[in-house]
Image: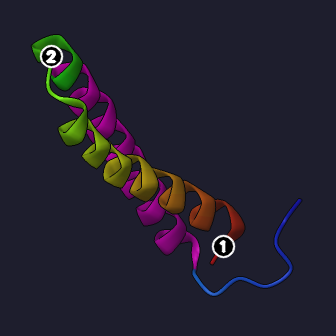
Amino acid sequence: MAPLATNIEAAGRRRRYGLGAAALGLGIAATAAMLSRGVDVGWRVWLFVPFLLAGLGVFQAGHGT
């Protein structure tokens, strides 16, 4: 379903999809690196940040906001 009103154009949506995909890739790579090295749980909490940015980028681009 297309959004009723958007405040970004197609170029902005592509940029947000791209940044969301890059943040997702960074989060996956950081997770793999941390798990393979046995990093403490306290440091792994910071993985929330790239996954949050990835989710926000994809959600905003999908809804045109």
Q: In this image, 13 relative to 2: left or right?
A: left
Q: In this view, does 59 lie to the left or right of 29?
A: right
Q: Nearer the viewer, residue 1 or 46?
A: 46
Residue 48, image x, y percentages: 37, 48
x, y percentage for residue 61? Answer: 58, 64
Which quadrant: the C terminus?
bottom right
Which is more toward the observer, 9 or 22? 22
For label 1, the residue is 64
Residue drawn at point x = 66 percent, y = 60 percent:
62
**Upstream in sequence: badge 2 or badge 1:** 2
**Colouring mode (rainbow / by chain / secondary structure / one colour):** rainbow
Q: Which of 60 and 37 is in front in this view?
A: 37
Residue at (61, 59) in percent of width and height: 59
Residue 36, position as x, y percentages in the image: 17, 12
Identify the residue at the far top of this view. 36
Q: Between residues 7 and 45, which one lies in front from this camera angle?
A: 45
Q: Does the magenta stretch include residue 6?
A: no
- Farthest residue toward the left? 37
Over which residues does the magenta segment extend?
A: 9-33
* Residue under the point 45% across and 63% down: 16
User: SS at mark 2?
Assistant: loop
